[in-house]
Amino acid sequence: MIVETWGDMLPSDLTTVDAQEAIDELGETPATANQFRAFLSRLMSWGVPRGYCTTNVVEHTEKIPGGEPWVPWPNWAFEIMFEHAPFHLKLICLSAFFTGQRQSDVIKMKKPKSGDTTMEVRAQKTKNSVWIPIHSEYRKWMDRAPKSDSIMLHAGSRTASYKTADGFRTEWQKLMNREEFKPFRENRIVFHGLRKNAVINLLEVGCTESQVGAICNMSTQMVQHYGREVALRSLAKDAMKLMEDRWKEIEPLAFRNSGDK
C-alpha cells in the first residue's frame, strides 16, 4: 500500500498531512488503519538515521478510534482452553497471563531452576531484560511440565522448543480453527489479550502503574492505555459507594413514602 501510494516520492517529501489522509481513508477498518500507521511510522523512523528523511512525520498523526483488535480473556475463554488445549499450549497461555509479556518473548522464555523465585525474560522489542517474580500458582504449572534437557520453558508439539515465532503461530492457528474454539473466533479473542489480562489483574489488586510496567515491560502510557477499563470501573465503584453512603441526603420523598420497602 505504501509503494502504491508514495512509491515515486522521496521519504523526505512525505508530510504529516499526506500520512493522515491515507490513514483516514482506511477509517472504516480501524485495526487496518492503525496497523498501516504503525508500519509507516516504523519505516520512517528507520529512514531518519540513514539519511532518507530528517524526521518521522507519522509521529504527529492520529490513530483511528476503536482500532484495538484485542480484549482481555473472559472466564469462559479460560474454561475452553483448559478443557481442549494440549498442556504445552496451556502453559504458554499461563506464562502470558502471569507475566504480561509479548507472544514472541513468552515462547523464548528460559526454564527457571527449581529454587528460583524470579525469572529473567529478554524482551526482543525493547532489548531489555525483565526480572519477573514467579507467582506460586504459575510455579505449580511449571512444575507439571514434562521433564526435558532443554533450557527452554516452552516446547512445541513435536520439538523441544520453538525455533521461530512462526512455528508457534502455525500451531496456535490450528488450535483456534478447531470447532471447540469457535467462540474465540466469533468474539475476536486472541493471544495478545492475555497481556491485557495481566495488566488489569495487577492494577485491580492495587499495583501502581510503575509496578505494572516493571513486570510487563511496558511504558506508563501503555499501562494507562491497557488499564483504562480498570480506572473506569474503579471510578464507578467509588461513585456508587458515595451515593450509598449519602443516600438519605438525596432520597426523593416519594421513595420514602412508598409501600415497597
Image (cartoon, rainbow, N blue to C red):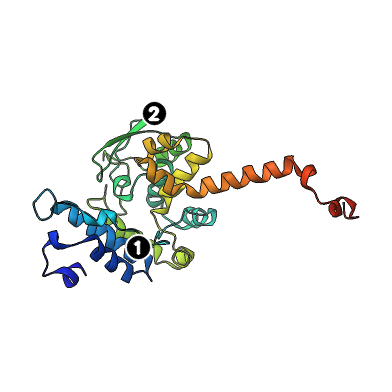
Q: Amino acid at mark 1?
A: Gln
* Residue 95 in sight from this viewpoint: no
Residue ranking furthest to the left: 51
What secondary structure is found at the residue carrying circle 1? helix
At 46% from the left and 48% from the top, the residue drawn is 197
Q: CA distance from mark 1 to mark 2?
A: 33 Å
Residue 18 image offset from top left, x and y in percent: 23, 66
34 above or below 87?
below
Mark 1 in CB contact with mark 2 (< 8 angstroms): no
Quadrant assignment, res 129: top left
At 86% from the left and 55% from the top, the residue drawn is 254
What secondary structure is found at the residue carrying circle 2? loop
Which sits in the foreground, 176 or 216? 216
Q: Which mark is residue 117?
A: 2
Residue ranking furthest to the top: 115
Q: Is 150 left or right of 13, judged from the image as shown? A: right
At 48% from the left and 45% from the top, the residue drawn is 200
Of the two numbered discs 1 and 2 on the same chain, state the one appearing first in sequence.
Answer: 2
Residue 8 image offset from top left, x and y in percent: 11, 70
232 above or below 209?
below
Q: Which mark is residue 173?
A: 1
